[in-house]
Image (tube, rainbow, N blue to C red):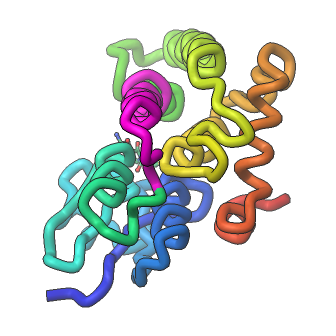
Amino acid sequence: MNETYTLYGSRGSGSAAVEVALEACGLAYRMVRAATWEPDSALEELRRVNPMQQIPTLVLPDGGVMTESAAILLHLGFDVPAGRRLLPEDSGARAQAIRGLVFIAANCYSAISIADYPERWTLSTDDKGREDLRQGTRKQLHRHWEVFADTFTGTPFLSGAQPGALDFLAAVVSKWAGTRAHLRENRPKFLGTLESIEAHDIVAPVFARHWDA
Ligand SMILES: N[C@@H](CCC(=O)N[C@@H](CS)C(=O)NCC(=O)O)C(=O)O
C-alpha cells in the first residue's frame, strides 16, 4: 500500500487543480510527470492505471485509482477528513459547488478535449474541416463559461469566504482555449474572481509551477 497519494500530471494541465486541492488539505503526494503530448514521460505507467491516459489521475493511499477531475475533488471533499475545506459546510452552498464542478467537467473540460484534438471527433481529414470544428467548439466553450459566470456568482470566491474545489477547477480549466480573453471582454467581474483565486496564498505557488507569469 502507498503511504501517500500519487498524482499523474504535467505542467499547465488539469492536474494543477488536484495539486492545489492536495496542498490546501495538507495531504502528502508524489508527482509523476505523464502526458500524452510528452512522449518521454511516464505514459505507459499512466496507461496501466488509466486506460484513457488522461491527467489528472490520482492513485489513493489504498491503491484505488481516481480519474475525472470533478470526481477526484469530490472524493477528497467528502471522504478525506483533511479535505472538508474543499466543499462548503452549508448544504445548499455545497449542492451548488457540486453542480458547478459537474458543469465544468461536462460542458467546459469536455469541449477542451475537442478543441485540442479535433481529429478525434470528426471524420473530416482536411485541415479546414478540423479547424472549423476547433473554432466552433471554442465558441460554444466560451458560451458555456458565460453561463457559468452568470450562474456561479460567489464572492470573494465561488465557494464563499475561502476558495474551494470549485474555485480550483474553474481557475485551471479557464486557462485554456482563449477563455480568459473572452471573459475579459464579456464577463470582466467573473474574470476578477478567477484572478483573485489565482492570487490566493494556496493557489499562487502551484500556478507558478504550472504557468509562466
Ligand atoms: N474528463 C477528464 C478530462 C481530462 C483531460 O482531458 N486531461 C487532458 C490534460 S488537461 C489530457 O490528459 N489529455 C490527453 C489526451 O486526451 O490525449 C477530467 O475531467 O479530468
Q: Over which residues does the magenta segment extend?
A: 86-110
Residue 134's place in the image compared with 75, above or below, is above
Residue at screen point 23% across, 72% down: 60
Residue at screen point 33% across, 76% down: 6
Residue at screen point 37% across, 43% down: 70
The location of residue 175, given as percent across then percent down, is: 67, 41
Quadrant (top left, top right, bottom left, bottom right) of the N terminus:
bottom left
Residue at screen point 34% across, 52% down: 54
The location of residue 193, given as percent across then percent down, is: 75, 37
Left or right of 3 on screen, residue 181: right
When asked about the image quadrant of residue 213, the answer is bottom right
When asked about the image quadrant of residue 132, the answer is top right
The location of residue 19, given as percent across then percent down, is: 50, 66
Along the line of sight, the residue nearer the viewer: 127 or 74: 74
Left or right of 211 on screen, residue 67: left
Left or right of 170 on screen, residue 37: left
- Magenta: main secondary structure: helix
Along the line of sight, the residue nearer the viewer: 209 or 101: 101
